[in-house]
Image: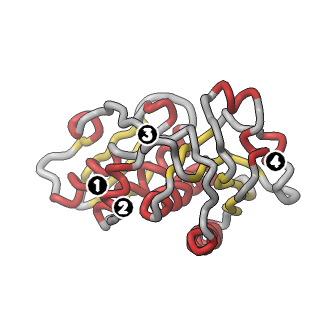
Amino acid sequence: MTIMQAMEVRHSVRAYKDEPIPAEIRQKLDKLAEECSREKGLRIFIRYDDPDGFDSRMAHYGSFRGVKNYIVLAGKKRDGFETDCGYMGEKLVLFAQQLGLNTCWAALTFNKKKVRALLQSGESLLMVIALGYGESAGTPHRGKGYSDAARADDPPDWFKAGVEAALLAPTAVNQQKFVFTFKDGKAFLSAKGFGFYLDTDLGIVKYHFEAASGHEAVIV
């Protein structure tokens, strides 16, 4: 499965089978998590066979069921922390999809107290990502179109491909509050209005754009 195919078939999944993730897949995921952490100065790690992270009233309220594995996005809080977590978290999400797994970003509907207990001194927790073999592949949600997310006159094909890929990215409550602008041969990404977890969303969207287009999207 290519990364573009992963973007197209990945949907949020909240209910998971009681099926352990094989050791060889864990090794691949852990290796990428370590690489992502080093690259952005974060602490991203994966908890396996640990149902406590989603053992809470909020998790049940969010319709999560059977979650025993999850990616933790944490680190020392600084400028760009949320955006970098979003970027690297989505990189892991799409890699997991390529490995046959399902995922779901969770900002509120998990047991924060138990997950925070896993952190080291001085670290901040942003959110987690449920991980495992879903009971289903999830359901696509109708989103915005290219013209809603792009401001460009006669842009190159790579820009169009990047924006189309960005529109496949998960965002908080499917808000898709972002816009890409093409100017002087470069792509710029900015938030559009206000909303929940916009900085994290920008990181997620930036990864989709760059992975599909092969060009950088500068956040402004």
Colour pattern of the rendering: secondary structure
User: Would you say the residues marked 4 and 3 are in contact, meaning their CB atoms lie under 8 Å apart?
Assistant: no
Mark 4–mark 3 Cα distance, whole angstroms, equals: 28 Å
The residue lying at 42 percent from left, 54 percent from top is: 206
Of the residues shown, which amino acid type is indicated by label 1?
Gly
**First in residue order: circle 3 vs circle 1:** 3
User: Please, what is the three-letter code of the amino acid marked with disc 3?
Assistant: Gly
Q: Which residue is mark 3?
A: 138
Q: Quadrant of the N terminus?
A: bottom left
> Is the C-beta separation of discs 4 and 2 under 8 Å?
no
Comes first in the chain, label 2 or label 3: 3
Q: State the residue lying farthest toward the top.
A: 61
To which residue does mark 4 refer? Answer: 116
Q: Which residue is mark 1?
A: 162
Spatial CA distance of label 1 from label 4 is: 35 Å
What residue is rendered at 53% in x and 61% in y? Answer: 92
For image coordinates 54% across by 60% down, the residue present is: 88
Pointer 2 with pointer 1, Cβ within 8 A: yes
Placement of 66 over or under 203, stated as above or below: above
- Of residue 213 and residue 97, the one placed in the foreground of this image is 97
Q: Residues within 10 Å of mark 1 (few under 14, many from 20)?
A: many
Crowd band around label 4 with a 10 angstrom C-alpha radius: few (<14), some (14–19), many (20+): some
Q: Find the distance from the CA under tag 2 to the CA under tag 1.
A: 7 Å
Q: Is residue 159 visible?
A: yes
Of callouts 2 and 1, which one flags the residue occurring earlier in the amino acid sequence?
1
Say whether residue 79 is visible. no
Residue at mark 2:
210
- Which element is circle 2 on? helix
Q: How far across and how far down the image is residue 81, in percent?
A: 63, 53
Amino acid residing under circle 4: Arg
Q: CA distance from mark 4 to mark 2?
A: 31 Å
64 sits left or right of 187 in the view:
right
